[in-house]
Amino acid sequence: MSVPSFRDFLFTPDHPRVAEIRGLNAREYAEAAKSDAFAGPMIEGWQKLYPQPFVGVTSDGVLRDGLFPLRAARAGEEAPAAEMAAAAQKLLSVLTPEQALRLSYAVDAPEWQSWANPEFLQHDTGLRLDEVDGTVREAALAVMGASLSAEGFALVRNLMRINGFLGDLVELPLLMNEFSYNFALYGEPSETAPWGWQLFGHHAAFNCLVAGTQLVMSPVFLGAEPDVIDAGPHRGVKVFKERIGLARQLMGALPETLRKEAVVYAAMVDPAMPEGRIHPGDERHLGGCFQDNRVIPYEGIRVSDMRAQAVAVLDDLVDDFIAYLPEGPRAARRREIRENYGESFFSWIGGWEDQEAFYFRLQSPVVVLELDHHTGVFLSNDTPAPFHMHTVVRTPNGNDYGRELVRQAKSH
């Protein structure tokens, strides 16, 4: 099967999809999007969900207790707490008083839940990186760099560059550029007390909470449209190729009977799907923005039913998902996920061979991992394509945003 090129789906410059919003910046488009046929209904639906009091994602509406104890991390699993706090203090030192006020929130503030992944700005939380000078922007990026692995920081910077590439392609650079992202701090930077940071914008959202030597990074949303940069100074950038390959490899490693059980819907848009299963923005994703309290029932097959060969591929797939974590927290998260394989479920939608589009989810009491191929938003493909995908990481049962760790810290 030939590989489709995203360039086959570029809108002409005079197409209403792009022409009607050309020249608008993020704040202007925030107003225009409310009456947009595509964005308006999504915004209306999301407004009903934010800010509901935080509970957490569950599989059945009931929180599981005791999954995330606040304690010193095991040896080799420690967060880079000193480096993170120092970077955050450096950021605060280069801000004006007004900027510092806009940047900072309480550690358990509801604004944590204001993040979103579309290009249209719904909640203007923190500082917008394309509206501050280079010193402030680099200091904010340095907080991220101190909190992420080298490969994780490289990935998010490449996603930001792809966003800028897309903005140039469709001639909307005021709306989508390399720095059209909001950044905020939560709590006082500390090597012992809980605090964190947030970045969100088109196809990239991180929520990071550090409590002493423990680190929680979720929700995390990473996506791309397109998935490559084929021109300009960053030509050659590609994202998610290994993750997609591992997912196909995992399906291939399953016996046919188990593979069939894993597939909950054969088609990406399937007549058997219940009403509402496909969201206009999230499509098949269940754990996207404003879904902090969603009930997501388990589906598919148990990981405990997989053969060793398939579990080995799943291990690699999980490692690829959490590669943004620094070494210590990555080891902790890997262990936590694998220790819960006995209660983990793997489900699939769509095809799995060649270039077929697909969705999958790994779900357990401690993690939800999703990947979904999407139709075009700023490209014209009206069916899901491999060059546009969204990925989501959630920590269910109350520990998104490290909220369970914060709760325990406040109760001590």
Image (cartoon, grey):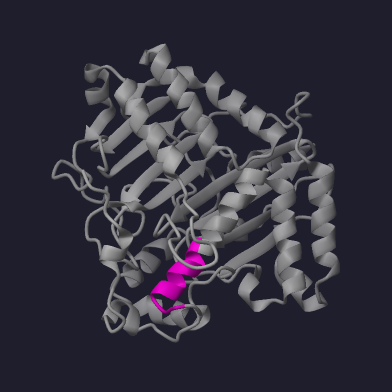
Res. 379 image quadrant: bottom left
Residue 383 appears in the picture as rendered: yes
In reply to whether residue 169 is colored magenta, the answer given is yes
- Residue 51 appears in the rendering: no
Residue nearer the viewer, 168 or 189: 168
User: Which x, y percent locates residue 83?
Assistant: 82, 47
Q: Residue at x 84, y 49 (%)?
A: 190
Q: Height in image: 14 above or below 45?
A: below
145 vs 274, left or right, is right
Was residue 218 drawn as part of the magenta stretch in this picture?
no
* Residue 284, above or below 23: above
Image position, residue 80 (x, y; %): 78, 41
Q: Residue at x 28, y 57 (%)?
A: 375
Span of residues in magenta: 162-172
* Percent x, y of residue 153: 64, 50
Residue at 57% across, 50% down: 155
Near-viewer residue (46 or 207): 207
Quarter in which the C terminus is drawn: top right
